[in-house]
Amino acid sequence: MNLFKNSSFKGIISVIMSFVILFVSFYGNASAMGTNDDQFDNISIIEENQTRLVTLFEKDGTSIYTTYEKNSKELTAEVIERPNNILGFSLFEPTGTQYEIEVDTAFNGEFKGTLKNTDTEEEIIIDTTSVENDQAVAQIAVPLIPVLQWLGAAVVATLGIAAIFYIDGELAVSISEAKVQTDVKRDPNAYYLAAVNFDNNQVFIGPKYNYNGALSKLRAGFSIYTVESKRAETLAKNLSTHEPILHTREYYTKGEGYLMHWHPANKLSNGKFEKMPQHVWFGF
């Protein structure tokens, strides 16, 4: 499962707007298809230091301030709407809504998370990772949908600016970092949920699993990282019971990651084997 990055956050916005965005709340479900024509009128970093990142995204009279607290990992947003009349000026005072944000996935432009309105305590799920849900019936008030679309894009772009990635509800870290390598060496029997950052082809790891948990995630379409080649090979083989396919340096293309890895193999009707999309990376 391809899961994000930071170098061009305008590109991230363009990507996320092209995905189906699914909203789920206690009012019901709503889905909306974003397009590449949806662009913010202005994008700026209001504050950035060692403890905090604040961004401003503006679109059609709506301002979205997103704040990421680097120490506490808290993510919040304020949406300020300025209703305009047909002449283009506002007859009313701007209205502001505060949201607390819990992130599940933020990687390669995909976002899944929960927005909680701090006044009403309404919770809304934004999910761009499940395109099969694009037939959900819209029951949220239609004017809310584009605002929530923009908010979702602003959140994932802000995390991208901060180089913060989430996989399955946990902060993800690059296996290329020396400290991460030291940590995983302490438990060579462990398996980690993993994904490739498309911008730099580095492998990032998230939550840790035992063998059974890793096999379950592999069956669900996720990719896995483990330290030892033999453990990686065994895991890949046991997904399909066929001999897995090894990819070495010549396969280090976009989406494959700068690490050797095994692909589970699928037997075709003609007797040949093809690689399955899941990766089981190993080593450093």
Image (spheres, rainbow, N blue to C red):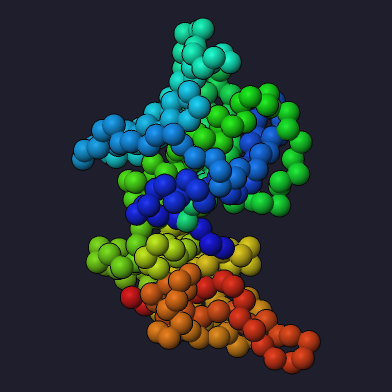
> What count of labels does the image hold?
0
Please determine whether, in this image, residue 159 is positioned above or below residue 120.
Answer: below
Please determine whether, in this image, residue 148 is positioned above or below residue 268.
Answer: above
> Residue at the bottom extreme?
271
263 lies left or right of 207: right
Q: Position of residue 148 (x, y in %)?
A: 56, 32
Q: Residue placed at 46% from the left, 82% from the top?
A: 251
Quarter of the figure with residue 178: bottom left
Q: Position of residue 50 (x, y in %)?
A: 21, 40
Pick the residue in front: 132 or 150. 150
Q: Residue placed at 35% from the left, 39% from the top?
A: 73
Quarter of the figure with residue 35: top right
Q: Residue placed at 73% from the left, 32% from the top?
A: 138
Q: Residue placed at 52% from the left, 73% from the top?
A: 279
The answer to whether residue 158 shows anywhere in this view is yes
33 lies left or right of 104: right
203 lies left or right of 69: right
> Residue at the left extreme?
50
Q: Position of residue 277 (x, y in %)?
A: 59, 73
> Residue at the front extreme?
87
- The quarter of the image holding the C terminus is bottom left
Q: Position of residue 49 (x, y in %)?
A: 21, 38
Please determine whether, in this image, residue 190 is positioned above or below residue 126.
Answer: below
The answer to whether residue 229 shows anywhere in this view is no
- The quarter of the image holding the N terminus is bottom right
